[in-house]
Structures are given as C-alpha cells and as structure tokens.
Amino acid sequence: MKKFEPKIIGFLCNWCAYAGADLAGVSRFQYPPNVRIIRVMCTGRVDPAFIIEAFKEGADGVLVAGCHTPADCHYIAGNFKAERRVLLLRKVLKQFGIEPERLRLEWISAAEGDKFARVVTEMVDDLKKLGPNPLKT
Amino acid sequence: MGAEKEKLKFAFYWASSCGGCEVAVLDINEKILDVLEIADIVFWPVAMDVKYKDVEAMADKSIDVCFFNGGVRNSEQEHVAKLLRKKSKFLVAFGACAQLGGIPGLANVSNREEIFKRVYDEMPSTKNPEVVRPKTRTEVKEGELTLPEFYDTLKTLDQTVEVDYYLPGCPPPVKLIANAVEAIATGKLPPKGAILAPNRAVCDECPRTREEKKISEIKRIYELTPNTEECLLEQGIICMGPATRAGCEAQCIDANMPCTGCGGPPPNALEQGAAMMSALSSVLGLNEEKNSDYDAQKMINQIKDPLGTFYKYSLAHSIFRRKVMNK
C-alpha cells in the first residue's frame, strides 16, 4: 500500500502568514511539501464555504493562518472574525462527521518563518495519525 | 364562436414533505378560480384520483407545468420525479423540501439503518417485539407484496432530475406562487434555472431598525420576549435573515419569531450554512474582542447545534449534503 501523504490547503494572509511562509523558504527551513498555499488578502476573507469546499474536494487538512491578535491585522480585526469562523466551523465539521482537528488556525507573523515550518510539520504528523479525509473513503 | 383557447395543463405532486405546500396552493384563495380559468389540473394525488399509469399514458411534455413539492427519499418518489420530468414542459421545485431538502433533509445526519432502528425499535411509543421492519418485498400466500425502497440519503429534486424553476419557502408565499402562475400564463418566464423570488436577503425586507450589529450574548427564543422594534440578531437571537433569500416579506419576524431560513441561501452564497456562520461570526463578540479576557471559544460555545440551526432546511442542498457515516 502506498504511504498516506496528507494534502493540506493553506489559506495564508498576504501581510503576515504568507510573508512568514516566504521567510521559511528564504531561510531554507525544512518542512514537508504537503501544503498547497492559497494567498488571501486577509484571513477575514476566508469564507467558511471555501474550507468546506476544500474538504469536499478531498483535502485532508486545512490551515488558516494570519496575523497575530489582537493588534497585528492589516485590516484591524479580520483575524478576530476568522478565528470565530474557524471555531464555529470546527463545531459544524464535527456534526458532519469530519474530525475538527483537520482544520487548524495559527497566527504567524512575517518574522516567524520557523513557526510556519513547525506548524506545517506538526500538522502533517497529526494528519498522518488521523488518516485520510473520511469523505474520500 | 371561435374555438376556446386551449387551457394549460397543471400537475402537482407531493414527495417527501409535510403537505403544507399542498395547502399553500389553496392559500391563494379565490385566485384558484383564476387558475382554473386558464388551467386544467391533470394530476394531483392529494385532491384527485389519478393513477401513476394514467400519467405514464400521457404523451411526453404534455403537462405544461408541474409543481413538485418534497425531496426524494425513496424509490417511488424517484420514479415519479423522473416520470413527471418526462411528461412536463416545466418542472418547478415547489417549496423548501424540493429545492433544498427541507426538514426531512435533516435526516441526512443519519442513515436508513439508524432511522429504522429508532422508528421501529427504540421509540417509546413503539411496541415491536418481533422487530418487524419494512421490506421492499414480502411473500404472503396471496403473492408478493412490494414497498418502495427507503434511501440512506435524501436528495433534492434537482439532484434527481433537471429542474426548470424554483419556488422557495416553507411553504412558498402566496404572492410568489401567484407571480409564478401569472408568469407561466403570460409566457413571461425568466431564464431557466431561476429562483422565482427576489434577489435579496430577508434583512432587506425586514422592517425592524438596525444599528451596527454587535452581539455579546446569544439567547434562545424561549429565554425572553424580544421587543418588536429592534433587529432580532441585535437582541441576541439567532435570526437567519442575513443568510436567507427574501420573498416572505419577513413574515416570521413580523410575528416576533426569528427567521429560520426556509428561503434557502441568498443570491451569490455558495451555501446557506456557511453564509450564516460567516455573518454570525462577524458580529458575535465584536465589543469584547479587544478586551484582555476575551475568549473566542467561549463566545462560539454559546451557539447550540450549529448544524441544525444553520442548515435547518438546506442540509441536503449543502456542499457536504450529508454527514459522513462509518460504513
């Protein structure tokens, strides 16, 4: 049997987490290649439907990452809205029979390339334990 | 005397729904006489004795308009949906159940086995020591008896056959039905696939006053009597208005009850549940988020049964369509 390699969709905000991921690359931090990044202007732009669609299309995990609360958001409070959406969606995912751990929210600043690499590494490990997205089986 | 103008042929069908849509047809009151002026009803099981074989004998596309209410829950409903599609020029998904799955669609958090177990074994009012369950075929001495097959998943009408128009609502508001009948009678029909309701959200029809929405505490409707002036969401009651298509003229809100979302997703929303999650998360805790003791999880934990609240009518129509069940 082929070893399970989880697919992760990462919604990263333009100002912090995307720059953090960029820094991870520039700094040559090693992290697993399982994440497909979608750059958004703000985590507040991430409609819960995008995340639902990602799972429906077979993503094993979804990472939403943006600027630190309380004060880093480029648009003042988009990250607070994203946080509540993710927490609420995690409750809904559970009711849909999908493990809420598959959806992760992280605050990663433009200076935290190491944190981005660590978060992705952890997430891949967690998802390998959890197994494939139940919608696929 | 010239030949009388040929009347339109109407059909009505009732699949997996409560029957309220059938009554809604009669709610147009004396307008029903205008309908009969222009139309003959050729099939309406709840009111007329016409058999399926009579419909099968009709020529294809010989029914002008079929109003189909209810989702597709079993093989009989699927058969009739396909049959009426073949026989009708226009097939209209009539009401929330046909369009979105409706309340019966909430059973998509379960499956046939669980539903049967609950209904035929576990219900306190059920006495069934031999654990009799409905079977599609049963041998009796007179021969074989058959029942339709009950499916695991309830489907909307358009997940079963092609649908021409949608009339949202639980049941569809009289005004929308009357508009639809008039559009059909005059031939002024919108493009195929249109939802025959206004392109805006319930909030746009709601007469209540709205300030900037900021909620700190979620309350359930039995916990208070809301005042009749202010927006219900601002009073902490989950009102689906922002994530629901208009057309009802905010009837429930007029009766001081929150919108529960029967109109389905508003224009441009990918699904109703996500639209409401988004809207509610935007306003809940807006005052508290900059406080040092702000706890987002605590805010969100106030929302009980989010799936049942946000997908009350649209679970079968949502992106996931159903709960993932262990095989």
Image (spheres, coloured by chain):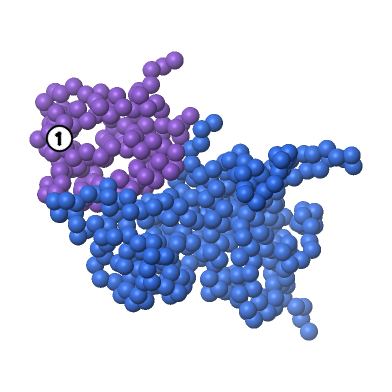
Query: Circle 1 is placed at which residue position?
Result: A20
Q: Amino acid at mark 1?
A: Gly
Question: Is the C terminus of chain B in the top left, top right, bottom left or bottom right quadrant?
Answer: top right
Residue name at image x 66 percent, y 59 percent: B14
Q: Residues within 10 Å of mark 1 (few under 14, many from 20)?
A: many
| Quadrant of res A32 | top left
Tag 1's secondary structure? helix
Q: Which percent across, then down, holds residue A61?
A: 34, 33
Q: Is residue A131 left or right of residue B115?
A: left
Q: Which one is in front, A68 or A30?
A: A68
Question: Is the N terminus of chain B in the top left, top right, bottom left or bottom right quadrant?
Answer: bottom right
Residue A6 visible (yes or no): no
Visual hue assigned to chain B: blue
Q: Residue furthest bottom?
A: B1
Q: Which percent across, then down, holds residue A88?
A: 33, 48
Q: Is residue A135 left or right of residue B61?
A: left
Q: Which percent across, then down, holds residue B115?
A: 60, 44
Residue name at image x 63 percent, y 69 percent: B23
Residue B180 visible (yes or no): yes
Q: Which one is in front, B326 or B125?
A: B125
The answer to whether residue B215 is above or below residue B252 is: above
Q: Chain of mark 1?
A: A
The answer to whether residue B195 is above or below residue B72 is: below
Visual hue assigned to chain A: purple
